Amino acid sequence: MKLRMQITKDPEIRFISHLEYARTISRAIRRAKLPAAYSEGFNPHLKFSLASALGVGVVSYTEFVEIELAEPMEVELAAKALDKALPRGIRVLAADAVDTHHAALMSQAAGANYRVTLPYSRDISEAVTAFNEAPQLLFKKAAPKTKAGFKEIDVKFYIPHIDVTCDGAATVFAFDCKITPTGSMKAVDLLNALNEHYQLDLPVEMADIERLNLYRLSKKGNKVPMLNNDAVKLG
Amino acid sequence: MEKELTIDILSSVQKPARYTGGEFASIIKPQAEVEATICLAFPDVYEVGMSYLGFKILYHLLNKEQGVQAERVYAPWIDMEAKMRERHIPLRTLETKKTLKECDIVGFTLQYELSYTNILNMLDLGGVPVLAADRTDEDPLVIVGGPCVYNPEPLADFFDFAIIGEGEEVMVEVMTAYKKWKRAGKPGGRQAFLQEVVKISGIYVPSFYKVEYNENNTIKAVQPVAENVPPVVYKRVVGDMNSVDFPTSPIVPFGEIVHDRIMLEVFRGCSRGCRFCHAGMVYRPVRERKPEVLKDLARQLVDNTGYNEISLVSLSSADYSCLAPMVHDMIDEFKDDRVSVSLPSLRIDSFCVAIAKEIQAVRKSGLTFAPEAGSQKMRDVINKGVTEEDLMNAVGAAFESGWNSVKLYFMIGLPFENDGDVLAIADLARKVQYKYYQVTGKRGCKVTCSASFFVPKPYTAFQWFAQDDLENIRRKQFLLKDEIKTIKNVTLNYHDSKTGIIEAVFARGDRKLGKALLLAWQKGARFDGWSDCFDYERWLEAFAEAGLDKDFYAARQRGENEVFPWEHISPGVSRKFLWNEWQKAYAQQLTHDCRRSTCTGCGVCQKLGVKIIDYKNAHGEVEA
């Protein structure tokens, strides 16, 4: 069986890298003594996977880990044991189980919901309206591994609509970002694209980015939670 | 409230998790319970500092004390330091984000002479005056400990007091005294506390001693100038390793650190008596932990950390009396947990190769041997106690077990060494390759030789020795390099020797060097142990401006009766024993290991009232 858990990357540990996050989960699985499956060979490693690679500095309340078990274990017990074995800053929110051959969770993710907070107070409503009405917005995102060093994407394909509010001290962006089998885009690139196209001076380097939700889409296009309806909820 | 690190800064530096804490098993106590905060400060980057067992022990031990909060801080890498200085952000602890100035005590470990500039830099970044004389009652007490503390004199201007020897017991005594003084309202200020703490055995307060010099700049005398101050501060030593606490739930970092595994200390001390070895002298006597105790600790460590490797650490783990059965038991016990067992170093014999083979059943690792010197003459000079035959037997056993490459570790620049001795390293590599041919019938065995530049250390037989100068050591390096170039599949690694010179200056330096240290730091020296940060010219300028001669410290042969700057601090080893060892080095005579044989007269057990503990025999104690 395969355990699937929704876990967090809380603000206090936001600066650990994806690799560091993965190592931490694997050690926690061992500390929790989950009956996890291992690969064969000289360097046996735990069979577990993380749904997505979160950027350094990005907070998330909706990360997912899938753990293949060598023998079955009650979902709630497993979730509680792992939660206890994790450092402060990573919590288990919910868990379910599926059979081992079930498709990887991440292949089903269709979109993510973000909140981005900036210490910025100028009125950008015109740019926001223009963005929401634009049919297309091309942006050259950095792609260090390619020959050109960048890749042109249509921001509007991934992020059709943004909601922006300002309380006088901070500006908050709320939006959904599409995830496709060939990839997605970084939340921070939305800000870069806005700066570039509408000549804004958003302090991108100060962006406090939080991923609030990750979801699947039903055949009708409705948002569906990643875990099954019968998932056990903790905390 | 002073500024903290912001998102933009943390997003722009390498490995930001170095600075944010929150690791599994890190300890934050409710602030209402905390009476005194001690910051364990490691003067190098996080990955290096987090690998240090001494601080794992103290962190655990001090946090067990009621009212004491032990926290950690590491040297920010240069990218982070630049940001901190630009925005005036102070250096803070990882746990409660206190600035160093806000801590009660800041304790640095002295692991390596080339990290001294980082101590000054960290104090400055943490808002603490770098000079002890400039600190007020508003500032923390700055203390030092660790292996280099047997000559802390170059740092005497910068710390308030030093912990000499093993910290397990004395650190608790210091914190108890501190809490008492703080509860009473800190009567008499920091001076009064120093007068109180100096009464604890193993505490050295440099400002309570006066140093007199001879006209030739050597030391005339070092004498106490205050009451209740011992003329010689002897190290503290833990009598029984079985009863002292060992951390069973150390912090597990998020990222990869240098020694990213369980470190289980099987014994402390080593009495093989290698004449170059500082650790072998200052950590005496040998005291083993019982195998049952170790197995119990290992189980707890595996359960609590989730690590998949246990390293059995000590100065020479292959010498552990119960090694083979214990390794066997551990491999068996932890097989299902997918935990492997490893040894940090191997002794040169076939027993060790057999152990290595058993260990490798779980995970593959390379084989490294340390003959230390190429010729038999030199191995006798340093009292290595290893012959060429031993090495051939060891590598032969390794090749029979399927290894096809070995690493050999050597030193050059040792006392009484001539060019022939240096070239003997290449010869030995050649013989190792031939052994491979003899055993396997094949050629192409890969031999990696590493040759480091010998640095004489205080409290060793070679403390009288004049280190090779730069020209000579370079000549020897090139000589060996040219010779090794002619051998197929043998490679030579060596480092720039300039760092070795500076290390030698501080290893046997005196208080006057504080001025040079301060100047070098002011000129931008930090991370001197990192070749990309080290600047030799900067150090030469600092010495010149301080009016000091590096050769006086590094490249000068000392006379039999010269008073050394460090002799008012002692690991218990007698000067007479060391001088005899120095004479025996010249005569190429060996001194046996006292561990399971007769006393060789170093004086430590008698002076400190401790005993060798070794479980070769049933009850463990060896009569001196």
Image: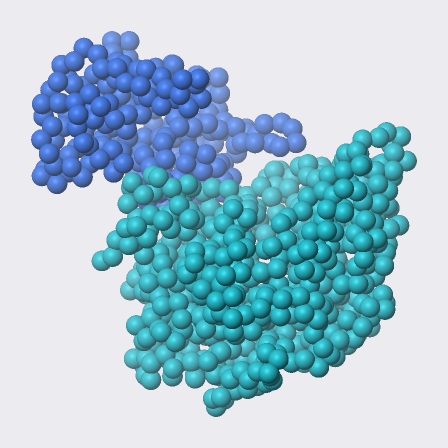
Chain colours: A blue, B cyan
Task: Tell me what residue is drawn at x 48 percent, y 29 percent.
Answer: A48
The answer to whether residue B471 is above or below residue B593 is above
* Total number of numbered discs in the rendering: 0
Q: Position of residue B94 (x, y in %)?
A: 38, 53
The answer to whether residue B276 is above or below residue B182 is above
Residue B495 visible to an observer of this rendering: yes
| Foreground pick, A223 / B586 | B586
Q: Where is residue B312 in the image (x, y as percent from the top left)?
A: 65, 52
Residue at the bottom extreme, as displayed: B227
| Foreground pick, B547 / B6 | B547
Task: Tell me what residue is drawn at x 39 percent, y 67 percent.
Answer: B130
In the image: residue A131, left or right of residue A232: left
| Foreground pick, B204 / B364 | B204
Q: Where is residue B432 in the image (x, y as percent from the top left)?
A: 83, 41
- Quarter of the figure with residue B197: bottom left
In the image: residue B614, left or right of residue B140: right
Task: Tell me what residue is drawn at x 66 percent, y 77 percent.
Answer: B572
Q: Classify the position of the C terminus of chain A by image quarter.
A: top left
- Quarter of the figure with residue B616: bottom right
Task: Tell me what residue is drawn at x 52 percent, y 34 percent.
Answer: A35
Q: Where is residue B171 in the image (x, y as percent from the top left)?
A: 49, 71
Residue B383 visible to an observer of this rendering: no
In the image: residue B120, left or right of residue B265: left
In the image: residue B14, left or right of residue B484: left
| Foreground pick, A230 / B294 | B294
